Structure formats: C-alpha cells, structure tokens
Amino acid sequence: MQWENFHLLLQESLAQKEGSLIVGDIKQSIYRWRNGDWKILAGLGNDPSFRIRECSLGTNWRSEANIIRFNNGLFTAACQVLNDRYEAEQGDPCTQLLDAYSDVCQQTARKDEKGYIKLTFLPDNKEEPYAETMLQQLAEETDALIRKGIQTKDIAILVRKNKTIPAIADYFDKHTPYRIVSDEAFRLDASLAICMIIGGLRFLAMPDDLIAQARLAVAYQNEILHQDISLNTILINKVSDYLPAGFMLQLEELKLMPLYELMEKLFILFSMERIEHQDAYLCAFYDAVTEYQQKHSSELTAFLTYWDEKLHEKTIPSGEIEGIRILSIHKSKGLEYHTVLIPFCDWKMENETNSHLIWCSVAGTGKETDIAPFNELDIVPVNYSSAMANSIYRSSYLEERLQLWVDNLNLLYVAFTRACKNLIIWGKQNQKGTVSELLQEALLQMKDPPMQHEETDSEEDKSSAPDLYEYGTLCLSEPSAEQASGNRLSEQAEGIPVRLESTETAIEFQQSNRSADFIRGEEEEEDSTQYIRQGRLLHQVFASIRQESDLPEAISRLRFDGILESAEQEKQITRLAQWAMNHPKVKDWYNGTWELFNECAILFTDENGHTQTRRPDRVMMKNGQVIIVDFKFGKKNEAYNRQVREYMNLLSAMGYTHVEGFLWYVFKNELEEIV
Ligand SMILES: Nc1ncnc2c1ncn2[C@@H]1O[C@H](COP(=O)(O)OP(=O)(O)OP(=O)(O)O)[C@@H](O)[C@H]1O
C-alpha cells in the first residue's frame, strides 16, 4: 500500500516534468518479514507508467580490493549454486534470482591488493561441541587480532539473531579482558543505580512489598556499602535497619515529592554516586522520565507500571562506549566496520521457525490446480514444509522457497559487504539446508579469487569440503589522524566522559507576588465567597491603577498573573470597575490630575518604641491637599473608620495640613468621609 501511494506521487512528479531519483539495492532486501518487497524495485523497469533510466554504481569505495574480489566471486558462485538446485528440479533457470544478482560484481577504487578473508567451518561432535568451540574460537581470534594491532573499536561482531548476543557477551566477560558493546545489552534495567531508584519508588508506592524492599536493602548493603549481607538475613531482621537512615526518616516527605526530584533525592540518599559507569544510563533514564512527565502525572504506581511494561527494556546508545561492537545483521545494514566477525554463520535456508505460515490460494488462478474442493476457499493458511511440494499448493511452496533463498542470500550479502578491511566467518561443517552448506558449495565452485585452504589429511576428510579458507593478509588499525599528521584540523573528535551529578535543590512553588498577595486576601468576613473574590479582584484593580484609562492594562495584568479565571469573570470585573468609577468624586480621583502614592507604606514608631507599618490603599495629593482612600468590599465597620483616622493622623504628623480621609464601599459605591 505504501508503494501504491508512493507510485501516485512519482507519477505526479513526472507529470510536472520533475525528475525523481529512486535508490535501492535488491541484494540488500532483508526486511520481507516486515512486508518489504524487493520485487517492486526489480519490476520498476517494466512499469509502463514510468520512463526509467537504470544506473548501477559499479565502484565499491568501502572495502579493500581483496574483499571486493572475494564477495564478487563468492556471490556469483552462491547464486549459481542456488540456480543449479532450482534448475535441476524445475528444468528452467531461476531468472528472478539471476536478475537480482546480475550486478553483484563491483569494481575497486584502490590500486593495492589489500584486505583479508577467513572462513572456518567447525565440526559438531561430542569432543568439540559446536557452540562451545564457536565461542572459544571467536574469543581467541578476537584476542589474536587485538594483539596483532587491531583496536577494539574497529571490530564488529555480526549475528543473525539478537538472542545470540547475551551468550557471546557473557563468554567474553568471563574469558577475555575485552568489553562487548551492544545496544541490546545496554538496557536501562542493566543499570544498578536505576534499579535502585526504581526499588526506592516501589518502597514508597507499595509499603507492603517486603521482598522488593529487601532486594533494595541487599543492593544497598552489597553494592554501595560493600557489606556481605544476604537477602535471608535482611528478611529475618528488620528491612529498615539495612536501608539508609536518611531515607527511612523522610518517607512521608518523599512521598509528596514530584517524580523527577524524588529520583534525584533517592540517588543522593542512597549514595549512588559511588556506583561506577552509571552516567550514560542515568542520562538516558532521566531524559525518558522528563519525556514521560510531559504527558503523565508524577503518580508513582502509574510510573512503575510504565517502567515494568516498557521503559525497563529501553536501550541506551552504545556509540560512546569503548569496546567491541556486537549487533544483528539487520541492524548493520548501511554501516561499515574495519574488521567484521561473523560467528554462527549457519542459519537455515528454509524452515527457520516451526510455525511458518503461508497464505495460499488456488481459487481463480485458472491454472490446473484451480479445482474443487481446493478452490472453494479463497485463501488457506498452510504450514510451510517440503511436504507442500507434493500438494496442490506446490507452486506457492516453490515461490516461498525461492523467496527464502533470496532472503538468506541477501542476509549473507549484507553481512559480508559491511567489512572494510578484514572479514572473518565461522560456519558449521557439512550442515545440510543451511547457509554454511551454501557457502561451502560456493567456495568449491569459486574460480576467483583462488582461496587458500587447509589440506585435509585423513581419507575420510578428503571426500568433504575443506574447513578453513584464507585469502589476503590481515590489515591492522590505522593510527589516528592526530598521530599521523599532527594537523589540529584533521583531529578526530574525541568523546569526553561526563559524570552525572545530582545536587539537592529545595523545591519551590513560584508564585507571582501579585497572585500571592491576592490569595492572602483581606480580612473580610463576607459569607459569599464569590462576593469576596470579586472584592479582592477589584481591590487589586483600584490599587494598581493611577487613572481610569489604566483599567484595561490592569485587567490584562491580572489575566497574565493567572488571577482571572475566565473571560466571563474578566468582563464582569471590568463592568464593575467602570460602574464604581462612575461616582463623581471617584471619577475626579481617577482623572489623572493627582499625584499618587499607591499602597505606599507609612513607617512610624509606636509608644513602645517598635517600628510599625501602615499601608493605605490610595494616597493622592494635589495643590497641597492630601486625600486618603481605603477601598472596602464588605459591610460598614467602625474599625475601618479608626483605621483611616490613624492614616490621617500619621500624615498630619508628617506635616501635611490639608488631609482628608474616605472609606469607599465599592459594592454600594458609597463614600464615607472620615471626620
Ligand atoms: N566517491 C567516493 N570517494 C571516496 N569514498 C567514497 C565515495 N563514495 C562513497 N565513499 C565511501 O564508501 C563507503 C560506502 O559508502 P556508502 O555507505 O554511501 O555506500 P552504500 O552504497 O550506501 O553502501 P551499502 O548500501 O552497502 O551500505 C563510505 O565510507 C563512503 O564514505
């Protein structure tokens, strides 16, 4: 369907007289299991709606001449082997395959004949169990390569299945000093610090889960305090005795913290900075937590579910980590490595899984198989097996088999063309129906390059294919550009390890001053909260404006500060304010002719010698006359009169002679002059 959509776009582009460039390589089509279909690219030339000019890039700039020559020879021969099998069975050559690999031979851009290839086919018997020998040889070969002068970062191990990676990584861990680096191996749940943070969260979210708590305590005791205390000991005693005291004392506060800050706090409380090599994991983890928080709340159980279901298996980019890379052939597509090692190059050409269903149909084909009762069903799922060859679905079987052959030949092609300098492969001896067998047969048929192989001694061995092939000489790692030239401009960028640190910062709720003042409110005793809210809002408005024309700005500031809740409220407050300012005296105060001391504090010392502050709502001055106004939004109260009287006395004491005081009961729009 994707192609159908794309097809239309291409047609449209051609109709507009625009050229289009399609790039692809049929030989590298390895995603049929994800519905990739190489036949689309192969059939482009026959599509009447396009005017296609095909162009093959014949020069390989990646690999050394020996590797190119080897791959040219090997894949031409492998193609021939498969074609021979096909032809022997069906009488005709397999044009699909031959066409797909018609451009397999590439030219080299280099003059010197460099590059190294080695293929080994290992036995599988009691004395030399295949998997064990494979791991041993892989480790020995790697060790030899490094000793000879190939850097670990130049080596990549390619595998057919991701599930092989842990076994190889484990073997290297136990038997070699070298580190295996793989995206698959670097999951977040491989990090002790992250697992402990999650353990801490579980403790807070599920206080009854004793086992989880004990696990956290074991990790803390063993990995951070380096105390040899077992899970049993902790479970028999009190778990809390084995956890940091700071953590146990602050459980209640911790439960209230936002997720991110809580994690950082746990990191500090458990002294996790003492665990090494956690930084790359922690950075990726904290990033993922930040992303999570953008869409979700800080609620702990929901986050723990997200961790258990998804986040724990997220991998960190291993690019920055020094070591021998290991990755699947599928992931290696498009990449290149100095030295490529391919162990377990023995996967089946067909029947890789036992439940390989293919959907077959004979109905409506018009062929001789289009017969009852088989054509009564539109489509039938059939388990792929060679038995299908003798059934009504023979043609579906043959088609699928060819596809499987092409898939596996393509996988080999992708893997073998990743190598720049050295290519080292291990397969299984005499293993029918596998790519090992295909390789052995192709090597025997290969005319060029002349592969050196081990001569076999015993009579029995002479009848079978050689087990070791070699060609060319090993290429060593090149000195880095910096050493080679001393030119600063050609220096390779170098990664600098960054250590992640958590510093404790007090969590603050930042509120605008005006919003805080507003929430603090007046000591009104009104029973209607709505009434109080409007009163406070109006108080803010009148206290902040100098003249009537400032009103729109004051309202918009309230909106900006988050004080106004809705457009409706905004309208209401504006209307109320305009109405209140319509009082003739008030109109005069807000006409802009008065000098204003808005909410200025008056400082004075009381009879006990203590400094006191008073803050009238509005103090205005004009021509030596001073007017004090306090806005009130509740019922009349004698106390208010005393309050304004006090302000007036204070101002008189400051030397003002004409001082007037007013209480403005806004909701009644009534002014009370204080005498
Ligand atoms: N014209 C050129 N001169 C020098 N080096 C080149 C040139 N073209 C490509 N290279 C180098 O050759 C290598 C392979 O190139 P690139 O990855 O583009 O090939 P590709 O066709 O995509 O390979 P594949 O499909 O097999 O992954 C790269 O290291 C690239 O820098």
Image (cartoon, grey):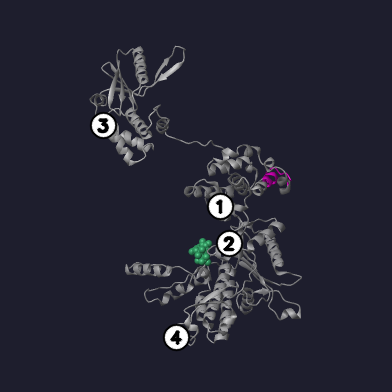
Q: Residues within 10 Å of mark 3 (few under 14, many from 20)?
A: few
Q: Which mark is residue 337?
A: 2
Q: Considering the numbered disc 2 on the image, is that residue within a helix, a strand or a loop?
A: strand
Label 4, label 1: how far apart the Cα atoms are:
55 Å
Please state which of residues 361 and 466 is positioned toward the viewer in this rendering. 361
Q: Residue at x 27, y 35 (%)?
A: 575
Disc on the earlier residue, 3 or 2: 2
Q: Which residue is the site of mark 1? A: 305
Span colored in magenta: 217-229
Q: Considering the numbered disc 3 on the image, is that residue within a helix, a strand or a loop?
A: helix
Q: Are marks 2 and 1 in contact (CB under 8 Å)?
A: no
**Three-letter amino acid code at the position of disc 4:** Gly
Where 234 falls versus 533 (above or below)? Answer: below
Q: Which residue is the site of mark 4? A: 366
**Three-letter amino acid code at the position of disc 2:** Tyr
Q: Nearer the viewer, mark 3 or mark 1?
A: 3
Q: How many marks?
A: 4
Q: Which mark is residue 579?
A: 3
**Three-letter amino acid code at the position of disc 3:** Trp
Label 4, label 3: how far apart the Cα atoms are:
89 Å
Label 3, label 1: how far apart the Cα atoms are:
56 Å
Res 315 seen here: no
Please state which of residues 610 and 51 is positioned toward the viewer in this rendering. 610
